[in-house]
Image (cartoon, helix red, strand yellow):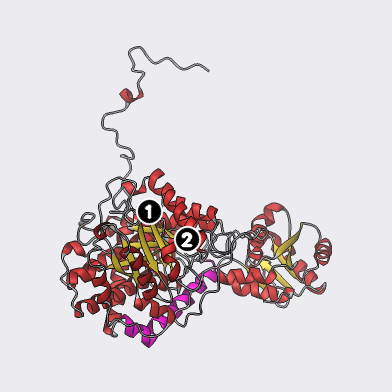
């Protein structure tokens, strides 16, 4: 093939041939929102009978997403949803961040969590983390983690003037704080150059353990950190509430309510309000809902700056410093490598959202204590995003995005309203004591459980695309037994589905798929049904096509009491009821239909079809029914 020769005198440079005022799509009129909504209605009304057609507004409402705590996500955003004056990073109201990222590789602290009670293992892991990219250490001091008496040994090789150190505890915050403070007080380094956080959150500890927090002498910790200008005494921990079921709105609201109680107590005990604000950090959740996480971090800063305004705090001190931790609630035991993807999304979201420090929980967290490999992945998730993807080089990259600005404003306003209710009821301590927080969490968890069970909130690798043949992780050190907490209860989203898998573990429980017609008829629903049964670890055997007699014979050979028909409406109308009736007569205890019962035609299927499997059904309830039929013990 030869290249055509251009006309004499014509330029061979494509750029020279482009018109100076090229306007792409210039001949097309920009559609209005109303025109777009009308097109949406047209699509959704296809197949709907006369008299049941959706209006444009009802069609749009079908596309809206609503969260458990009342947030509404629109299907499309316009310029009207954008913020007015965006402001600037590191300036009131700090929506866009508390600091200026200058393009360096230290845009945020890469903070590694350590909780292995084997002090030799922890000491080596800390050294490895600091040598290979982490610049901040977080020790958890608890009966099932590091002992307070081992804190000094754990940090023996850490250069305290180079690495920041945080400590936290679910059971003994004072003991943990004293242990860390003793290490720093014994250092010869200049206090002003050291950075530590004592991790004190007495209200959070009471939420987890029950009882009433003692705020009578919180000012002592501010006084003891005098001279440590880069250090903080308190961390208001939102992960406590997230892991107990809180959504975006309530996590922000309860963080605000808790922090305000600390400020009031400190001021009453003689601490300057600026110093009181300066003694508090926030620990927040980085979840795998990317936009919601970005918006939530921005909303917390916006709301906390407003609190600072009310307290008449100096403008420069009103910024909310945030330590983001990837969600424990969203970690799964099954198909655990998907947790790496979840952590990557969450870390990206926390970085874009402006977190000052980020901790990635290892992907094998549920299986036991992490090993070198999983710790390396957790650490490098941040390092790759910061140093190779260059996320940290941009200040508030989400700023101005219509969706994110709208959601930031919505979370801030809803959280402020919820915060107001807590204040009106006497504050966070009173709300915990009255059971208000627990009641709210019960409601949120019930709503979330429904979304999870119907897969409107899917869990990849668990409730969607499960791998029933995956090998378990067996080479991890088991975690010590955790104490029994008397307060809020933590639970992971995947636990109801993991219970289904546990019921079939070690059994040969299975379901028979009666695939009617040809693959073009049954292929889609066979895949859907297999995915459904694999959620519970149920194996599937099947027959493809054949006569009713052949299908019944194949089912009898399978040895399972449960059969599921898979095909198209066209084939169901011809063969579906006949096959189902024959399976029932042959002894099948449960016959299911993949699809809509109406696809069988105008026939009476009662007593023959025991149920259907389809999008939107409660898969937990449905699979529990199947497990009862196949005879496994739950």
Give the residue number, with chain letter if any, for mark 1: 135
Residue 120 x, y percent position in the rendering:
51, 60
Instruction: State the SS at label 1.
Output: loop
Q: Relative to residue 264, is residue 112 drawn left or right?
A: right
Q: Relative to residue 50, is residue 255 drawn left or right?
A: left
Location of residue 338 with respect to 609 vertically, above or below: above
What residue is at 46 percent from the left and 72 percent from the top? 142
Instruction: Let me know if residue 73 appears in the view.
Output: no
Chief secondary structure of the magenta span? helix
Magenta range is 428-455
From the image, which quarter does the C terminus lie in? Answer: bottom right
Counting other residues with Cα less than 10 Å from the Cα at mark 2, is it few (<14), some (14-19), or many (20 or more)?
Answer: many
Residue 340 x, y percent position in the rendering:
51, 55
What residue is at 72 percent from the left and 78 percent from the top? 607
The answer to whether residue 441 is magenta is: yes
Give the residue number, with chain letter if any, for mark 2: 361
Instruction: Let me know if residue 143 appears in the view.
Output: yes
What residue is at 74 percent from the left and 73 percent from the top? 630
Location of residue 64 with respect to 254 vertically, above or below: above
Q: Relative to residue 1, is residue 181 drawn left or right?
A: left
Task: Work out whether residue 35 or residue 263 is closer to the camera in this orientation and state it.
Answer: 263
The residues tagged by marks 1 and 2 sit, at their Cα atoms, a distance apart of: 16 Å
| First in sequence: mark 1 vs mark 2 | 1
Instruction: Please tell me in which quadrant of the rendered image residue 221 appears.
Output: bottom left
């Amino acid at each position: 093939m030869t290249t055509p020769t251009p006309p004499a005198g014509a330029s061979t440079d494509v750029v020279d041939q482009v018109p100076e005022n090229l306007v792409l799509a210039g001949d097309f009129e920009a559609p209005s929102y109303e025109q777009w909504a009308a097109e949406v209605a047209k699509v959704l009304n296809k197949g709907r009978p006369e008299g049941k057609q959706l209006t444009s507004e009802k069609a749009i409402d079908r596309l809206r997403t609503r969260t458990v705590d009342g947030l509404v996500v629109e299907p499309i955003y316009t310029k009207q949803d954008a913020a007015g004056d965006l402001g600037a990073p590191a300036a009131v109201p700090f929506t866009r961040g508390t600091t200026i990222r200058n393009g360096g590789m230290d845009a945020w602290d890469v903070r590694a969590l350590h909780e292995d009670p084997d002090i030799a293992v922890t000491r080596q892991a800390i050294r490895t983390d600091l040598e290979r990219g982490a610049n901040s250490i977080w020790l958890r001091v608890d009966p099932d983690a590091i002992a307070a008496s081992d804190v000094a040994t754990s940090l023996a090789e850490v250069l305290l003037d180079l690495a920041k150190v945080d400590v936290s505890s679910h059971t003994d915050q004072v003991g943990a704080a004293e242990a860390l403070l003793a290490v720093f007080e014994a250092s010869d380094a200049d206090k002003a150059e050291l950075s530590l956080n004592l991790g004190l959150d007495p209200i959070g500890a009471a939420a987890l353990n029950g009882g009433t927090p003692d705020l009578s002498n919180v000012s002592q910790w501010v006084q003891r950190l005098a001279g440590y200008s880069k250090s903080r005494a308190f961390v208001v921990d939102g992960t406590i509430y997230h892991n107990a079921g809180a959504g975006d709105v309530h996590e922000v609201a309860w963080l605000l309510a808790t922090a305000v109680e600390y400020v009031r107590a400190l001021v009453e005990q003689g601490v300057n309000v600026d110093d009181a604000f300066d003694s508090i950090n926030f620990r927040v959740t980085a979840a795998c809902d990317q936009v919601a996480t970005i918006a939530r971090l921005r909303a917390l800063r916006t709301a906390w700056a407003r609190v600072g305004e009310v307290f008449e705090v100096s403008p420069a001190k009103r910024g909310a410093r945030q330590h983001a931790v990837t969600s424990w609630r969203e970690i799964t035991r099954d198909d655990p490598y998907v947790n790496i993807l979840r952590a990557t999304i969450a870390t990206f979201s926390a970085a874009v959202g402006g977190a000052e420090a980020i901790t990635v929980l290892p992907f094998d967290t549920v299986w036991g204590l992490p090993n070198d490999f999983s710790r390396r992945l957790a650490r490098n998730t941040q390092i790759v995003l910061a140093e190779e993807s260059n996320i940290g080089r941009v200040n508030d990259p989400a700023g101005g995005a219509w969706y994110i600005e709208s959601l930031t404003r919505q979370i801030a306003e809803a959280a402020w309203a919820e915060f107001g209710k807590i204040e009106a009821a006497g504050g966070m301590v009173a709300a915990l004591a009255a059971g208000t927080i627990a009641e709210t969490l019960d409601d949120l968890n019930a709503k979330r459980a429904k979304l999870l069970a119907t897969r409107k909130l899917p869990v990849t690798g668990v409730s969607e695309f499960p791998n029933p043949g995956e090998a378990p992780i067996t080479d991890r050190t088991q975690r010590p037994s955790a104490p029994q907490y008397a307060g809020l209860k933590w639970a992971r989203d995947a636990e109801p589905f993991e219970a289904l898998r546990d019921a079939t573990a070690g059994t040969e429980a299975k379901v028979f798929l009666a695939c009617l017609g040809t693959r073009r008829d049954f292929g889609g629903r066979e895949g859907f049904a297999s995915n459904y049964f694999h959620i519970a670890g149920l194996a599937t055997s099947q027959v493809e096509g054949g006569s009713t007699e052949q299908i019944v014979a194949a089912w009898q050979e399978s040895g399972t009491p449960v059969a599921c028909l898979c095909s198209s409406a066209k084939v169901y109308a011809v063969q579906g009821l006949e096959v189902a009736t024959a399976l029932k007569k042959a002894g099948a205890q449960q016959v299911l239909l993949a699809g809509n019962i109406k696809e069988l035609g105008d026939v009476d299927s009662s007593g023959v079809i025991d149920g259907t499997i389809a999008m939107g059904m409660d898969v937990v309830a449905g699979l529990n029914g199947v497990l009862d039929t196949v005879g496994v013990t739950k």
